[in-house]
Image: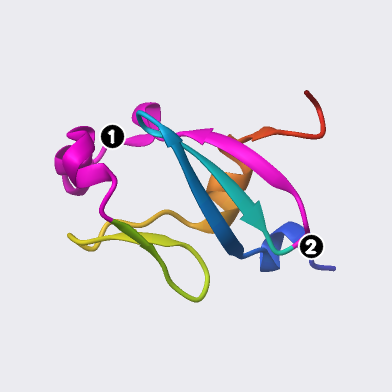
Amino acid sequence: MMNDIDLIRIIDVDYIAGHTMKLTFSNGEERIVDFLPLLTKKIHEPLKDLDNFIQFGLNHWTLEWYNGAEFAPEYLYSQGRSLQAA
């Protein structure tokens, strides 16, 4: 049986500050994600510069950046801090 998290998408994004964003997921939850600790691969290196980081877009399922970097929505969901828990 598949969990709801397996089919989750990002449906809205609000840039907060620094490398932090508020993501709204298709299950209705909002989570705050600090991306800086997640920028660990070579493709993520340019995103450590805020001028590059803020050049993101929302495709049909997740965030993507100008250089092709993206994260699976279920990964961002698991890394985010729930606003309901605050």
Quadrant where the N terminus sits is bottom right
Q: Residue furthest bottom?
A: 60
In the shown orientation, is residue 34 left or right of residue 25?
left
Residue at (71, 64) in percent of width and height: 26
Queried whether the magenta region covers residue 38, the answer comes back as: yes
Q: Which residue is mark 2?
A: 4
Q: Secondary structure at mark 1?
A: loop
Q: Position of residue 67 (x, y in %)?
A: 17, 60
Q: Which residue is mark 1?
A: 40
Examine the image and state in which quarter residue 30 appears.
top right
Q: Secondary structure at mark 2?
A: helix
Queried whether the magenta region covers residue 39, the answer comes back as: yes
Quadrant where the C terminus sits is top right
The amino acid type of the residue labelled 2 equals Asp
Residue at (67, 63) in percent of width and height: 8
In the shown orientation, is residue 34 left or right of residue 47?
right
Q: Position of residue 65 (x, y in %)?
A: 27, 58
Label located before the other in sequence (1 or 2): 2
The amino acid type of the residue labelled 1 equals Thr
Separation of marks 1 and 2 at Cα, in angstroms:
27 Å
The answer to which of 32 and 71 lies nearer the viewer is 32
Residue 14 to residue 1: above or below: above
Region rendered in magenta: 27-55
Examine the image and state in which quarter residue 44 appears.
top left
